[in-house]
Image (cartoon, rainbow, N blue to C red):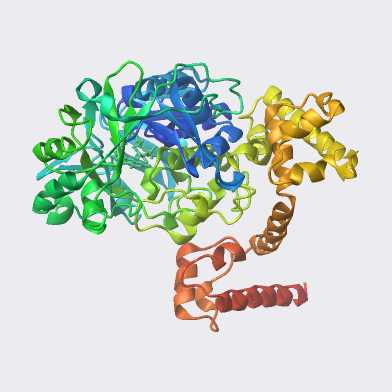
């Protein structure tokens, strides 16, 4: 059997699938080693893709040539555009996915991919030569050799599952933990930390009284996630809304001493923004109700996910608690909720290419970098896959900056600031969110996907045609006047829409402009002033980003700089002045000193005689 590859990806979760597909599509012989081939791309927690800011990430992955959006469109069972009453900067798409179909379709995509080899095995250690990753050793002592290794092990490293007082090693419910690999990473002098996340119970829908509940339907005409999908024509199903109440909270309050979160049993840090129900009741005692969404897990299953009541309570208490909720009086739990603690590698140890600073050609992506969420993982996965290929061919790394993609914001935040709790994406993390919209991800990023061979010629041609059309129509709107007003001015009015001016002007119809191009024209015209302002800010930002910090720099030898700043800069080793300015503990004064120091050194070097 073949045991020598260009790229080895460890772990077939959301990061691993995108990494493996990208590397194989870039022509590299790629091996995906995963502990269980039947559970690749498992939606470990809620059966949904996208959501606020996450929807933007999915669109960006798609524009780069990734798979997540396409598989969602083939398996989505409810689509909703969120924040439609707000501006385009914060609108995001969210889709419920059929959990099993999603997973199996991704498995099929992996199997069908040229250059991609798959082995079901548990990686136990890394092979390192001269501080460079050269392979992986599996459970059966098989040695897989590769020029680059990408680790995407999610919640599996030393995973410990908590449900009441029981603590069982596991990577997620029903799957064994990876017990050896984090020791191997520690052996390379990588720092390893501990985080925690949790999930609610799954219930059988036949035990739910739906007549008492409010259904929540998806959008009538679902907008697909992928730029390659024309239409969603799968059956769409509703979710149901219910609420916790005083009785629910009393059950929890009466038993706080039995929750591993409060007994000291759980030590890892959880995400503040995604608290368990016991945490919500404890932290917000004044609230006597929390919303609960019952979300179907698929079309061919009766299981439902109880969104909003994540818990690690003892099993019998989970049932008691759920049965206080309207519609769930006779509920039957199929799988208990639980919390999981796992090892992660604090991400200031990786470069913006996701390669570790300590070991060359070793890349980390996904939850192992301290993130939480399928989309955050997949985004890092595709970037790691591309960068592993670029590294092998000695090309410059592919780094997206904060002004061009949420992916850029995500990775920059991780490698510059690190994280002490599971990191998830929010629109508020992006400074230039009016430009980083979900609707224009193709216009921002497809050029890169095309350059790396991940976007087809046909898709690229279609994008160029769309760009031409947008330009033509914009020019026309500026030049054509009706009742002393240009059509652009009329469109700029708060209540007017592109369809309105299409009705007003017959020749506009002749442009035959697609709906997605219409949307671009409408947003560009309406928000022209704001967009121009944001572009001006980006110009300033880019000056700092383009001010490269040379390799030779030794921050410790800049005497004028404060000790804390020297230490922080040495730890992160930023690539640019811009990145340096975002490190916590580095002040604007430190940046000014650093700039003067680099410029001074450069001037002295120029003056030196040959
Ligand atoms: C209980 C629980 C609750 C969660 N709650 C939330 C939430 O509320 N919100 C949210 O956004 N996200 C949540 N998540 C996280 C979400 O599942 C992850 O963020 C996402 O799946 C991470 O993707 P990944 O690719 O990094 O890893 P994963 O999806 O975890 O995939 C890791 C893969 O690596 C494989 N693997 C691991 N170790 C090895 C090894 N040594 N050798 C070979 N293969 C290996 C595993 O089999 C698996 O296929 C939760 C996860 C769990 C388990």
Please determine whether, in this image, residue 517 is positioned above or below residue 89. Answer: above
Measured along the vertical axis of the image, is residue 544 above or below residue 137?
A: below
* Front one among 56 and 350: 56
User: Which residue is found at the position 69% from the left and 54% from the top?
Assistant: 530
Q: Is residue 453 left or right of residue 251?
A: right
Image position of 215 with respect to 254: above or below: above
Tell me where residue 322 appears, x and y as whole percent.
18, 37
In-front residue for pair 101/232: 232
Q: Measured from the top left, where is residue 278 in percent x and y? A: 20, 49
On screen, 395 above or below 203? below
Which quarter of the rendered image does ligand 1 occupy? top left
| Percent of width and height locating residue 153 | 34, 39
Quadrant of res 28: top right
Instruction: Please tell me which residue is depicted at 49% across the width and 60% down the height of the picture.
Output: 416
Instruction: Measuring from the top left, give residue 21's x and y in whole percent.
Output: 50, 28
Left or right of 418 in this view: 26: right
Residue at image point 65% right, 64% down: 544
Which of the image's four quarters has the N terminus? top left
Q: Nearer the viewer, residue 403 or 477?
A: 477
């Amino acid at each position: 059997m073949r045991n020598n590859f260009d790229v080895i990806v460890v772990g077939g979760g959301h990061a691993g699938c995108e990494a493996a597909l990208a590397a194989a599509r870039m022509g590299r012989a790629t091996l995906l080693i995963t502990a269980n081939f039947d559970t690749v791309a498992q939606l470990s927690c809620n059966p949904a893709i996208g959501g606020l800011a996450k929807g933007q990430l999915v669109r960006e992955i798609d524009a780069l040539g990734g798979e997540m959006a396409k598989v969602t469109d083939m398996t989505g069972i409810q689509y909703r555009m969120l924040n439609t009453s707000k501006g385009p900067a914060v609108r995001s798409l969210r889709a419920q996915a059929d959990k099993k179909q999603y997973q199996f379709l991704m498995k099929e995509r992996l199997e069908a991919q040229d250059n991609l080899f798959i082995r079901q095995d548990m990686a136990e250690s890394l092979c390192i030569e001269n501080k460079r990753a050269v392979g992986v050793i599996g459970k059966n002592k098989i040695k897989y050799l590769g020029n680059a290794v990408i680790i995407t092990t999610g919640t599996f490293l030393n995973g410990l599952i908590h449900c009441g007082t029981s603590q069982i090693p596991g990577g997620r419910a029903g799957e064994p933990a990876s017990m050896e690999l984090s020791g191997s990473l520690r052996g390379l002098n990588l720092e390893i930390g501990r985080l925690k996340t949790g999930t609610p119970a799954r219930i059988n829908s036949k035990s739910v009284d739906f007549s008492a509940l409010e259904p929540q339907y998806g959008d009538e005409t679902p907008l697909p996630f992928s730029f390659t999908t024309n239409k969603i024509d799968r059956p769409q199903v509703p979710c149901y809304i219910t609420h916790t109440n005083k009785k629910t909270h009393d059950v929890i309050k009466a038993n706080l001493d039995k929750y591993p979160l409060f007994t000291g049993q759980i030590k890892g840090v959880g995400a503040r923004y995604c608290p368990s129900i016991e945490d919500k009741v404890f932290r917000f005692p004044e609230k006597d109700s929390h919303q609960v969404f019952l979300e179907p897990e698929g079309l061919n299953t009766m299981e439902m996910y109880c969104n909003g009541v994540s818990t690690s309570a003892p099993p019998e208490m989970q049932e008691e608690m759920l049965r206080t909720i309207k519609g769930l009086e006779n509920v039957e739990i199929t799988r208990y909720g639980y919390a999981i603690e796992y090892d992660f590698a604090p991400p200031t140890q990786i470069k913006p290419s996701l390669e570790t600073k300590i070991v060359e050609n070793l890349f980390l992506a996904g939850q192992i970098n301290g993130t939480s969420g399928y989309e955050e993982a997949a985004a890092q996965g595709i970037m790691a896959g591309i960068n592993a290929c670029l590294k092998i061919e000695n090309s410059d790394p592919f780094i997206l900056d904060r002004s061009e993609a949420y992916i850029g914001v995500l990775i920059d935040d991780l490698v510059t600031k690190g994280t002490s709790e599971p990191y998830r994406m929010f629109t508020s993390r992006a400074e230039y969110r009016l430009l980083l919209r979900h609707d224009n991800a193709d216009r921002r990023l497809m050029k890169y996907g095309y350059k790396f061979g991940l976007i087809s010629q046909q898709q690229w041609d279609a994008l160029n045609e769309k760009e031409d059309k947008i330009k033509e129509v914009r020019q026309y709107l500026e030049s054509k006047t009706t009742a002393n007003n240009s059509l652009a001015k009329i469109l700029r009015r708060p209540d007017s829409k592109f369809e309105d001016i299409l009705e007003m002007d017959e020749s506009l119809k002749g442009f035959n402009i697609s709906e997605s191009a219409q949307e671009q024209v409408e947003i560009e015209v309406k928000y022209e002033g704001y967009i121009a302002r944001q572009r001006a800010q980006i110009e300033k930002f880019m000056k700092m980003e383009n001010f490269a910090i040379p390799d030779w720099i030794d921050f410790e030898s800049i005497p004028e700089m404060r000790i804390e700043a020297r230490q922080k800069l040495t730890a992160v080793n930023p690539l640019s002045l811009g990145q340096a300015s975002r490190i916590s503990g580095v002040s604007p004064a430190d940046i000014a000193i650093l700039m003067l120091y680099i410029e001074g050194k450069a001037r002295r070097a120029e003056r030196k005689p040959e």
